[in-house]
Image (cartoon, helix red, strand yellow):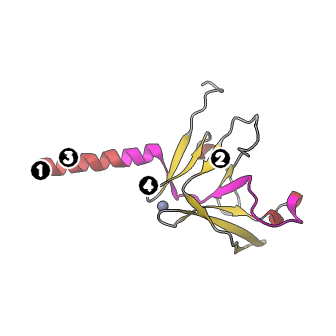
């Protein structure tokens, strides 16, 4: 495999809306131990970066008010990212105050998002599903 080749992988909400584009596959992302969400680093696209990783949320609406989640070892502030079509939460950001290096500030930590496990379909999966539907329709037409 070539390491310089950049393939963009796209992922969809369960309603089929495209919500994530990334050079990393979801399978390759680290998992957050607290809730099994997938950790997706978001590179700062405004700077010329040397990193080969690219990722972006698309067609999502970010909540401006955090939700307080109770965990076994305390609380955390989350900002939900919802699908703009069906309003299902597909990802969340954490508050800067949650992190050691940005403890004294607050607001959305922009450089990483956490993807809700099980809520996303890869474009390949979706196409496979579509093809299956087409197959069923064809068979149905034939039978009728
Ligand atoms: Zn959706």
Q: Residue at x 69, y 35 (%)?
A: 52
Residue 60 is situated, as x and y percent measured from the top left of the image, at 57, 59
Q: Which residue is mark 2?
A: 29
For residue 137, above or below residue 98: above
Q: How many marks?
A: 4
Disc 4 C-beta below 8 A from ligand 1: yes
Q: Secondary structure at mark 2?
A: loop
For label 2, the crowd category at 10 Å Cα-Cα, with few meaning under 14, some 14 to 19 and many 20 or more, is some
Query: In terms of image quadrants, where is residue 61?
Result: bottom right
Q: Nearer the viewer, mark 3 or mark 4?
A: 4
Q: Position of residue 102 (x, y in %)?
A: 86, 60
- Which of the two labelled residues, at mark 2 and mark 3, occupies the earlier sequence position? 2
Residue 112, placed above or below residue 10: below
What distance separates the C-alpha of mark 2 from that of mark 3?
A: 38 Å
What segment is highlighted magenta in the picture?
102-129
Q: Residue furthest top?
A: 2
Disc 2 under 8 Å from ligand 1? The reply is: no
Which label lies toward us, 4 or 1?
4
Q: Which residue is mark 4?
A: 16
Marks 4 and 1 sit apart, C-alpha to C-alpha, by: 29 Å
Marker disc for residue 138: 3
Of labels 4 and 2, earlier in sequence is 4
- For the residues labelled 3 and 1, the Cα–Cα distance comes to 9 Å
First along the sequence among labels 3 and 4: 4
- Which of discs 4 and 2 lies nearer the camera? The answer is 4
Q: Are marks 3 and 4 in contact (CB under 8 Å)?
A: no
Gap in Å between the C-alphas at discs 3 and 4? 22 Å
Residue indicated by mark 1: 143
Q: Nearer the viewer, mark 3 or mark 1?
A: 3
Q: Residues within 10 Å of mark 1 (few under 14, many from 20)?
A: few
């Amino acid at each position: 495999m070539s390491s310089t080749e950049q393939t963009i992988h796209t992922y969809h909400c369960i309603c089929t809306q495209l919500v994530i584009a990334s050079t990393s596959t979801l399978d390759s992302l680290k998992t957050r131990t607290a809730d099994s969400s997938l950790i997706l680093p978001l590179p700062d696209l405004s700077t010329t970066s040397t990193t080969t990783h690219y990722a972006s949320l698309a067609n999502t609406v970010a909540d401006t008010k955090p939700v307080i989640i109770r965990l076994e070892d305390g609380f955390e502030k989350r900002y939900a990212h919802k699908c703009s079509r069906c309003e299902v939460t597909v990802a969340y950001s954490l508050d800067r105050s949650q992190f050691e290096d940005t403890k004294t500030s607050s607001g959305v930590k922009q450089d990483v998002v956490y993807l809700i496990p099980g809520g996303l379909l890869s474009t390949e999966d979706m196409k496979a599903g579509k093809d299956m539907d087409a197959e069923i329709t064809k068979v149905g037409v034939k039978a009728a």
